[in-house]
Image (tube, rainbow, N blue to C red):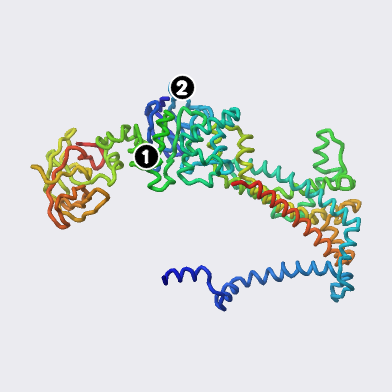
Amino acid sequence: MSVMKRTAASEQPRLTARTFLEPALYLAPFLIGIIIFTLYPFVNVILISLKENYKLLTGEFSTIGFKNYAQVIQDPNFLNGLKNTGLYVLFVVPISTVISLLFANLLNSVKKLQGLFQTAYFLPMVTSVMAIGLVWKWMFNYDYGLINFGLSLLGVAPINWLNNPLYNLTALVIYGVWSMLPFTIILLLAGLQNVNPLYYVTARADGAKAPMIFFRITLPLLAPTIGLTLIINMIYASQVFSELFPLFNGRPGSAYSLYTVVYYLFDAFYVKWKLGYAAASAVILFLIVLTLTGIQLFIQRKWRNY
Amino acid sequence: MQIKIDHLTKKFNDVTAVDDLSITLDSGKLIVLLGPSGCGKTTVLNILSGILPVTSGRVFFDDKDVTDLPPERRNVGLVFQNYALYPHMTVLGNICFPLEIKRIPKKERLEKARELAELVHVTELLQRKPSELSGGQQQRVATARALAKDPQLLLLDEPLSNLDAKLRVEMREEILRIQRAANITTVFVTHDQEEASSIADQVVLMKQGLLQQMDTARRMYDEPVNYFVADFLGAPPINKLHGTMQEGKFQFRDSDVRCEFPLLRAVMNGTDVILAIRPESVIVPAGDIKLRSLVVERYSIGKDELSLLSVEGQQMRAYISGDYPIRIGDALDFSLKNKGVFLFDAKTGERLS
């Protein structure tokens, strides 16, 4: 009887100063960091987005309302940014995922020097975006660039990637896809390495060919990992900004036509000094990404079937 | 289908996993590859399936040389220790998949799958996912999947090692039943001698890549060719009493007690030998030729009474009927049966008697 009682009690410990304070103390270092650097700024951005004519230094503002939002969603630059960001995400995320899948598969079947190849593929991740961007800027160069050289070998006329506004987005997408690869490949490779190799042995012994094994076994088993990379990459790609700088000398495209949402935010904050607009655009982006992620998670849960 | 393995050798870098193995496995039989871990039994299985290439030697299925054929052209069914059921497919999907690969029409596929599900008793589980099955059920499904494409050879790699003791006994009877019903040549790999003895038509016992003996489990137990075989089969293990040969007789170590056994060949004086006695080969009350011992301990194991005896300072286990009145500390005289008593050369393991 007494034993029964004790187990029951241990399942639901009473909240005392000790049972609360001790765990709280352990959690404190992490919690304080989160509150200062994540929670407070997050709440503050929402508040600022609601304050009209907010002054950062004095903290003054005229009224509270949705006027910042009304202004932002009428601003052609913001709408343009929304469109460009959308297109960027739409192209970069699926293309980079498919390419990564290919490379991850190849890497996974490499027996010798696998570690070396993995490191090589991961290197771009630890290299500065600016440095790589400058290399790409050279590669995109109209007269001397590698890409136009390659095209010329195929008999294609050179393309003015960086100075013709028509091709700006394409150049950005190509660079974006490339910069997304290492992280995606590593994630997918980790997923692939979790697949029990005996599935392949069995399937192969049953006579399955590589495409069938890939589509019927590898892909379904990798679905959770693919879903994860899609979500992470979508969130990351929707914040496209720093990629613009090296390619277009700090401008949003050669004719100021390649605004992205985050570039708009940057512009509103640092250049135009419109804090309310910047905050409002940040909140709008956040809501869009949140919605998309939610939809994606929902679909993924339906997919995931084991 | 009859399988012939001819002078098979498999090396992994410097390690010889299988050393010049030549055996013939009869059609329709259940053959167990038995041995301690690292003995090369799984290597042989993987070579039969075509997963591993040979270093030298040939493998024949009936008269056809399959040595260089890839797995998919050998028509073998595989079952692994952890079953490797596709987790994203239902039981039905798993059983159907080998047929799907062969592009067999859906209707026939489902028919065949249902037939197999009936054979292995998983009919009511067809719509479940592998994660919703118990170990025994997964084992059944894996066997059904392996049988789906009508293989001419079924290969089972430690198929029962993931199951608990009780289920293991049940499932080995099931495997035997299924094998008999499907009438398919089956090679079963295990390190469990009891499992091997209970289901095998033939046992192939290996050690460090070398074939030790191939025989029925019964004959292997009764007539082991060497010390390793005698020691590997039987639980509790065979008793080992150390001594030397003196004038054709076995003399206990640190003792002057001698006994005589019919020798297979002349043995030099002073050769170190092991007198191996099965626990059930002890006779009490003793006959004319007897050994004197001291009862150290008694255990009840189910229906049996196992006694720990001390003979000339060396310990041995013996089954002595519970009806026979002995107590711990008693002196006990016993004789030995002809069956289950062997002499082995201590150095080479060669059987001397």
- Residue A28 appears anywhere in the view: yes
Where B199 falls versus B27 (above or below)?
below
Q: Residue B6 is drawn in which quadrant? A: top left
**Between disc 2 and disc 1, whose residue precedes?**
2
Which SS class for mark 1?
A: loop
Q: Which mark is residue B64?
A: 2
Which SS class for mark 2?
A: strand
Q: Amino acid at mark 2?
A: Lys
Where A32 falls versus B181 (above or below)?
below
Which residue, given by chain and number where applicable, does mark 1 sit on?
A: B208
Where A274 falls versus B197 (above or below)?
below
Q: Real-space Cα distance between discs 2 and 1?
A: 28 Å
> Residue B174: where, in percent of width, then height?
41, 38
Residue under the image location 51 percent in, 68 percent down: A11
> Residue B265: where, in percent of width, then height?
18, 33
Q: Which mark is residue A22?
A: none
Protein chain holding label 2: B
Q: Amino acid at mark 1?
A: Gln
Q: Nearer the viewer, mark 2 or mark 1?
A: 2
> Residue B258: where, in percent of width, then height?
12, 44
In-front residue for pair B91/B81: B91
Q: Quadrant of the N terminus of chain A?
A: bottom left
Protein chain holding label 1: B
